Amino acid sequence: MKEKQELQVTDVFTKSRIFTYLWIVICPPYGLYRVLSPSSEFSRPEKWVWTMIVICTLVTFVKLIITG
């Protein structure tokens, strides 16, 4: 059981995922594209979570711009 948990933790920090995390911070739409692309390493629940995070971030940015 412990070996399985260790494998899951190391899978989170692959080179591809780190680049995707950076793109989510720098340019959320492109980061979301990388998360949702068919060749992505993200599982279905992770895709849902990252989609909601990006949507909330973009909505917050738009609200800040409008209400300035």
Image: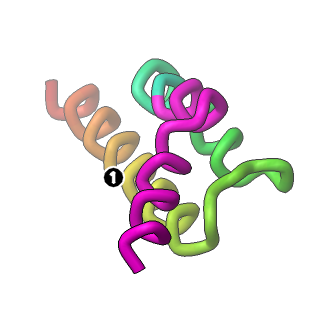
Q: Main secondary structure of the magenta part?
A: helix
Q: Residue furthest top?
A: 26
Q: Is residue 57 above or below residue 43?
A: above
Query: In the image shown, does 31 or 20 lie closer to the viewer?
Result: 20
State the count of labels. Answer: 1
Q: What x and y, as percent, mark residue 59? A: 34, 46
Q: Residue furthest left?
A: 68
Residue drawn at (48%, 60%), measured in percent from left and top?
A: 8
Q: Residue furthest bottom?
A: 1
Query: In the image shown, does 41 or 7 lie closer to the viewer?
Result: 7
The quadrant the N terminus occupies is bottom left
Q: Residue furthest right?
A: 38
- Which residue carries the number 1 mark? 56
Q: Is residue 52 magenta?
A: no
Q: Is residue 2 magenta?
A: yes
Residue drawn at (52%, 29%), measured in percent from left and top?
A: 18
Residue drawn at (39%, 41%), measured in percent from left and top?
A: 58
Q: Is residue 7 above or below residue 18?
A: below
Residue drawn at (40%, 26%), measured in percent from left and top?
A: 25
Dot 1: within a 10 Å radius of its alpha carbon, few (fewer than 14), some, or many (20 or more) residues?
Answer: few
Q: Amino acid at mark 1?
A: Cys
Please give the range of residues in magenta: 1-21
Query: In the image shown, does 66 or 64 lie closer to the viewer?
Result: 64
Instruction: Determine if residue 68 is in view.
Output: yes
